[in-house]
Image (cartoon, grey):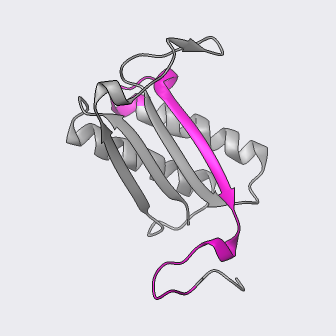
Amino acid sequence: MPFVQIYVGAHLSPANKKDISIAIHQSLMAHFLIPEKDYFQVIHVMQPEDLLYPDSYFDVPHSNNLIYIRITARSGRTVEMKQALYKSIASRIAATTPVSENDVVIILVENELPDWSFGQGVAQMVGR
């Protein structure tokens, strides 16, 4: 049940955006074991002046292809699962788009089952 927000520069093509989306979803299925239909994402297309970042951070250089990925998911995954997810997302994106692994910034925000409603004003995950 992750909710993914993807912030990309306007210069990336529709095909690039779709490839980024698919890379993230495939990685979530592989490492967080989510179902295929658990596919909730929003892509925010940003003008260059609206994506702010340093040239380098933690000795990782960044370019104008930098993207931000914010994943909101329930808590309970191990550090190892999270690290595998991050690596999978970055490598899959780099393999299919002009975005390098260095330019994939991922932020994971965790919450609990009662924090989700998938419609009808009901917290469907409560009690699961």
* Residue 3 pos. (x, y %): 51, 59
Q: Is residue 127 left or right of residue 27?
A: right
The residue drawn where x is 33% and y is 30% is 97
* Residue 96 pos. (x, y %): 35, 33
What are the residue bounds of the magenta stretch?
Answer: 94-122
Magenta-drawn stretch contains 48:
no
Q: Is residue 90 left or right of residue 87?
A: left
| Quarter of the N terminus within the rendering | bottom right
* Residue 46 pos. (x, y %): 31, 36
Is 46 drawn above or below residue 118 in the view shown? Answer: above
The residue drawn where x is 60% and y is 83% is 123
* Residue 117 pos. (x, y %): 54, 78
For residue 40, what is the image quadrant? bottom left
Is 95 drawn above or below residue 88 in the view shown? Answer: above
The residue drawn where x is 60% and y is 38% is 86
| Residue 98 visible to an observer of this rendering | no
The residue drawn where x is 30% and y is 41% is 45
Q: Is residue 68 left or right of residue 65?
A: right
Q: Is residue 1 left or right of residue 14?
A: right
